[in-house]
Image (cartoon, rainbow, N blue to C red):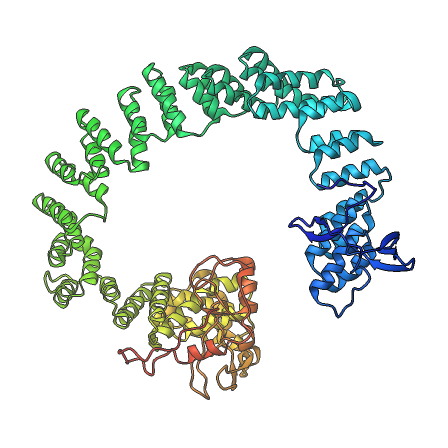
Amino acid sequence: MREVGKSGVRCLGQLDLSADAQLHIEAAPTPLQHGQVGVLVSDGTVVCQQSSGTLSHLRLHSHDMSSQAHVMDTFERQKGCFLQALALNRFALAFKIGLALNSRDLWLALGRRSLECLDIAWAKKAYRQAPAPGMVMYLDKIQTVEDKLLLSGHVSALFGNFAKAREYFLQSCSPETALDMHCDFLEWDQALQLAQTYAPHRLSDIYLKSASQLEGRNQNEQALSHYEMAMRDHIPGTRPEHESQCKAGIARTSVKMGDLPRGMQMALDLNDPTVCRDCAAVLHKMKQYVEAAQLYEAAGSYDQAASLYILDLNFDAAAPLMAKISTPKLHLQFAKAKESRGAYQDALVAYERARDLDSMVRICLDNLNQPQKAFQLVRETKLATGAERVAEYCRKNGNISGAVEFLLLAKNTDEAFLLAERQDEMATFEAGLGDHGTQQQHRAIAKYYEQRNLLANAAKHYALCEEYPTALRLYLKVGEKEIDHAIEVVGKARNDSLTHTLIDYLMGETDNVPKDANYVYRLHKALGNYMQAAGTAHIIAKQEQEMGNYKQAHQLLFRTYQDLKSQKLALPQELWRRLMLLHSYVIVKRLVKAADHHSAAIMLVRVAKNIQQFPAHIVPILTSVVIECQRAKMPGESYQYACTLMKPEYRKDVSEQYKKKIENIVRKPPPEVDQRDALEASLPCMYCGFNFAESQLDCLNCKNISPFCIASGMRMLKEDWSNCPACNFPARYSVFSAMLQANEQCPMCDAVVKPEELVLVSDPTQQIGYYKSLFQASESESAPAPPPPPPPPA
């Protein structure tokens, strides 16, 4: 390798480039002709004197291309010119030729040759063209160095000649640079030698780094010595981090060297989890389990600490740590150790933390006499092995019910059935089996109950194993209290023969005792015959209404309406009108409470026009009509129904509280003009726009039926449309929202509705179309009509 920065005579001749961009020069002599004597050499030209005394000029081979480079020359010739320019240190010429050739190898050669000559400026230009940004950045840093020896050291280091670089550095104005170079190469021995001479203030840092390297090489004795030297050369209190690193190293190497007391004490004094953990790991490898556990505990590594305490059989030391760890394996080891020493309660806690449920059950039963805790554990976890152990315990202690229950949990159903059958604990077996048993199991239970004349129980299990005829026969044999279950069986079976058998029973064909019509209604629903169910519901509702059970009749008709709507079936007009009439009566109390006497009076007049449907309360209802019409300033209606009450068949039943007032009304008839039409608003029909009284639902023009508002009973309006969020029945938004402020309960379905849940429907066109197609063409039509389109969401 050529030396850097040297000046003097250089050998010139034939040129070539090596792979690492070094310039190789071999001697290429230029012979003189006979009789020529060289007199002068200038810029590669030799001036010769001939024998005749004349002068001649001869161009040396080492310079013959330096002045002839041309852009039209071949690449090889231009490259020759470039190399010759490099050999002659003509960097400007070489750079110019390099721009034409643009070869990375040539740029690297120019950069290297420039560095050999310590020409940093040209070197930067060449490496920038290469490009070699790393070299450019490094040259930027050393470009301002003025000391030639220091600069030569940097360049030698760049070329990998570190010995020469050290020599240059030490001769320069900054010998500490040689120390930096050895530190960069982690050559701490050489660095320590130089630091003692040139930088004593850096000894502590170098000793620390050297000690860390030696510790990594497992040269612990020398590492400990260097850690101690780093501490000795350090001024206490000036750099806490340096001091902590030294103490940590001393702690680790002391433990590795066998000086456990010193190493452990220093690690504990540092109170550094990482140092404690490192020293603990060393002690663990040395099988010093107690000491390792102590350091793991100090480091907060409770799992490792507890593991080593248990390994060393030091359970007293491990006990306080068990609540802080979550490793099941450790808890299991601890539990077994506690159990072997008779500490069963502690063992139970440890088994629970280890999730060893079998052992928990065993300890509770065999050692702690806590069977109920074992029972509860098995019930919650469905643990098969634990269930077997509990079942055996129950059997030994005469708890047959418990034995049957836990044999089922253990999946030992055959043995559980035999035990239940033998000990008359079939109820327990049945409860444990639930509806998840096989047909064979339910059949066996049914036969057991049938043999003991427990027919309802037997029928239940015959139904579960799909022996519906037998189930129905037994239910009917029991009597009316099991009719609901009989209906359920027929609904599942969907068998015409069973259906007719049940209908005959309900109609009294078998025992001459007709049953409640509600059963027929439920049967039709169970069979999916919703239109027939609707007809039956109407009959039942009519009976309830005649008996004065208005709320029950209302609820039944409402449920029937919802069933028909869910099945997309048409609604019989008679059912709809009865529901409307009952609802009109039901909401009167709310309207009166809200001081809306006008609407209350109109609803009562609607009811009074159909008073024969309310035979149980004719007089009270007509009395209410008279009173509310008086309050609503409807004297015509008040007078009309007051006269009705004064008829002989009703007068005797009028309350004494109101009789005199009603008599006065009759004695003073109002003017001929009835003011009701003036008091009641006339609003357009939602279908055709024809104006008529808002309480009327049948349009006189288009003959369509409008839905009624569940809050006021009046006809629905397009611009004031909302729906109950629970039952989806329509209501006027303004009226319903005001009603909910006082009573957050839907008057139709009784569901709780918050005022903020109510939404104003901006375009109810779809819902209006749904209600238009909802009703049947005639009341007598019993077959299902084509299903109307489903109502849009509210």
Compared with 722, 672 (above or below) is below
Residue beneath the point at 66% across and 30% down: 186
Which residue lies most toward the bottom here? 701
Q: Position of residue 774 (x, y in %)?
A: 38, 77
Q: How many marks do you count on the picture?
A: 0
Residue beneath the point at 71% across and 49% down: 26
Q: Is residue 517 left or right of residue 670?
A: left
Q: Is residue 700 left or right of residue 177?
A: left
Q: Is residue 650 left or right of residue 245?
A: left
Q: Position of residue 199 (x, y in %)?
A: 78, 24
Which residue lies most toward the right here? 53
Q: In the picture, which quadrant includes the N terminus?
A: top right
Please tell me which residue lies in front, 492 or 648: 492
Q: Position of residue 665 (x, y in %)?
A: 51, 72
| Picture quadrant of residue 359 | top left
Residue 500 shows in this picture: yes
Please tell me which residue lies in front, 34 or 72: 34
Residue 240 shows in this picture: no
Q: Position of residue 38 (x, y in %)?
A: 86, 52
| Picture quadrant of residue 182 | top right
Compared with 136, 238 (above or below) is above
Which residue lies most toward the front here? 52
Please tell me which residue lies in front, 527 or 235: 235
Compared with 606, 525 (above or below) is above
Please tell me which residue lies in front, 395 or 32: 32
| Picture quadrant of residue 98 | bottom right
Compared with 645, 317 (above or below) is above
